[in-house]
Amino acid sequence: MKLALPDLEELARLPTLAFPDGKLLFDATRACLGFPLVSKGSIKVFRAFPNGREILLYHVTKGQTCVVSAACLFSGMPYGASAVTQGPVELQLIPPATFDRLMNDAGFRRFVMAQFTQRLSDLMALLDAVVTHRLDQRLATRLVAHEARDGAVCAMTHQQLADELGSMREVVSRLLKQFADEGWIRIERGSIHILAPGPLKRFASELA
């Protein structure tokens, strides 16, 4: 059962901060600025590597929090990951000292630990996908997820998909062309139209 954020006076007094699309909120080397509570938009949390590649860890959307930030606050260490807004974002930022006090509240503590549990499950699923599934199946899975959430159009570039999958744009472009040749998708500039979700789902469900 998903736990809701408790109604606490200290949270109600926090100002709402607004950020534009593409704003880097933190990177791996920074000390933690606080614990974010997202009320609008989406934040991508990812690991960036020296060779320029990235791997998506998770998205933070309304009602969710960033467990990388919580881990940073618990340990006093730098973030170890980066976060960037995807579209306009609004959030409240709980300062470190306030976060420490709120962890004494049983409801807030349960909320934070429930977020940890869910994120750990998501990261285990990501690890399972990386280890047991081919890149083409992981790409098909990502397209199916977008089709289920947003309809028949995946409004992402080849580079964005490559970043989410921890691969290279050229490799993803080649796989997308194979899917297009099968008649499963139609590729347009900045978007991918899903023409045959059934075959994509079947392909995605096959173990490598």
Image: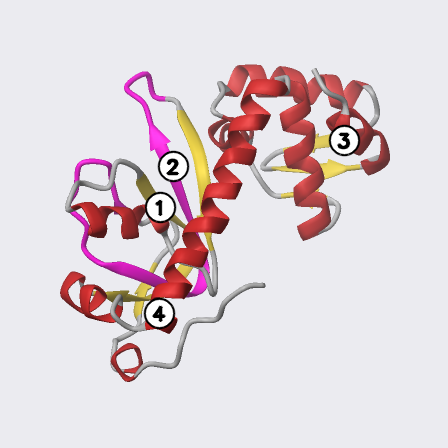
- Separation of marks 1 and 4 at Cα, in angstroms: 25 Å
Measuring 41% from the left and 64% from the top, which residue is drawn there? 111
Report the amino acid beneath label 1: Val
For image coordinates 68% across by 33% down, the residue present is 141
Instruction: Say which element carries label 4.
Output: helix
Residue at horizontal 75%, vertical 31%? Answer: 186
Question: Which tag, 1 or 2, sits closer to the chain's start?
Answer: 2
**Label 4 CA crowd tier, 10 Å (few <14, some 14–19, many 20+):** some
| Kind of residue at badge 2 | Phe
Relative height, residue 50 to residue 123 (above, below): above
Of the pair 120 and 158, the residue shown nearer to us = 120
Q: Identify the mark at residue 185; answer none if there is no mark.
A: 3
Relative side of 117 to 194, left or right: left
User: What segment is highlighted magenta in the picture?
Assistant: 24-52
Left or right: residue 7 compared with residue 100: right
Q: Amino acid at mark 3?
A: Ile
What secondary structure is marked by label 3?
A: strand
Residue 195 on image: x %, y %: 82, 36
Say which label, 3 or 1, has the lower sequence index: 1
Residue drawn at 35 percent across, 46 percent down:
84
Circles 3 and 4: CB atoms closer than 8 Å: no
Q: Position of residue 48 (x, y in %)?
A: 33, 28
Q: CA distance from mark 3 to mark 1?
A: 28 Å
Note whether 13 is above or below 174 in the view shown: below
Label 1 residue SS: strand
The amino acid type found where label 4 is placed reads Phe
Location of mark 4 (residue): 108
